[in-house]
Image (cartoon, rainbow, N blue to C red):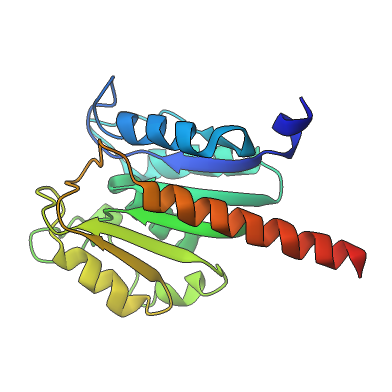
Amino acid sequence: MEGRAMAIPVLFIHSGGPQGPHEGSDDLVKYLRRGLRADHVILYPRMPEPENPEYELWKLTLDRELSALDDEVILIGHSLGASVLLKFLSEEECEKNIIGLFLVAPPFFGAPGWEVDEYLLRPDFESKLRQIPNIYLYHSRNDNVVPFNHLVEFADKLPYAVSRVFENRGHLFTAGLPELVDDIRNLSSHNIRNNKLGAAN
């Protein structure tokens, strides 16, 4: 029980589309749970109507999930889930201490062919994200759902973010994403060390 009490919460917002076994974000979440083990607890809420998603409904669910958490949290978004996180964090007031934001294959709505009004980010969306100290982007060049140039758009807007580029991981990362596990574990260890130093002072 003590290990669970000390576990760092990781809120994972899944992709759009079917979310059954081996669909959508299912395999990636299972991989993360194996990789992060008892050090973290992955919260994986089912978002409303994932095969016909509406931003307002996802926003309400995300707000409710965040409200139930303690102050410090790690956020992961996959595909549409990453776009929802970006829109929410850049437009809404979030009082949580977000120690890391991890975005896997996020679509850049507004790019050619991706002009979907309800998911468009504000022109200055990046200004609200500067308060998040650690932002990571992950994208594969052979992604056949979200073109790789969407990562280029985000990297241009978020030059302080760390970009991880892959050649053959696809869109769903069904074989796993060890780099994401390592980044989360390294970030969590660094945060714990800083907290201990602060308490000692």
121 or 7: nearer the viewer: 7
- Residue 60 in percent (x, y) is at 48, 40
Up-down relation of residue 42 to residue 20 (above or below): below
Q: Residue 185 at x, y = what percent?
A: 55, 51
Residue 39 appears left or right of 33: right
Q: Is residue 78 left or right of residue 111?
A: right
Quadrant of the snapshot with the N terminus = top right
Q: Is residue 110 above or below residue 118?
A: below
Residue at screen point 24% across, 66% down: 151
The answer to whether residue 84 of the structure is visible from this angle is no
Q: Which residue is drawn at 71% across and 44% down?
A: 70
Q: Which residue lies furthest to the top in this view?
A: 21
Location of residue 144 in the rendering, given as x and y in whole percent from the top left corner:
9, 48
Task: Name the outermost residue toward the right.
Answer: 201
Please identify the quadrant where the C terminus is shown: bottom right
Query: Which residue is at a point 25% across and 36% down the rendered structure image?
Result: 174
Q: Position of residue 69 (x, y in %)?
A: 66, 41
On screen, residue 172 versus residue 90, left or right, reads left
Total number of numbered labels?
Answer: 0
Q: Tell me if residue 144 comes above or below residue 149 in the rendering.
A: above
Give 132 or 63, whichever is nearer the viewer: 132
In the depicted structure, whether residue 180 falls above or below residue 126: above
Specify whether residue 194 is in view. yes
User: Along the line of sight, which residue is nearer the eye, 18 or 8?
Assistant: 8
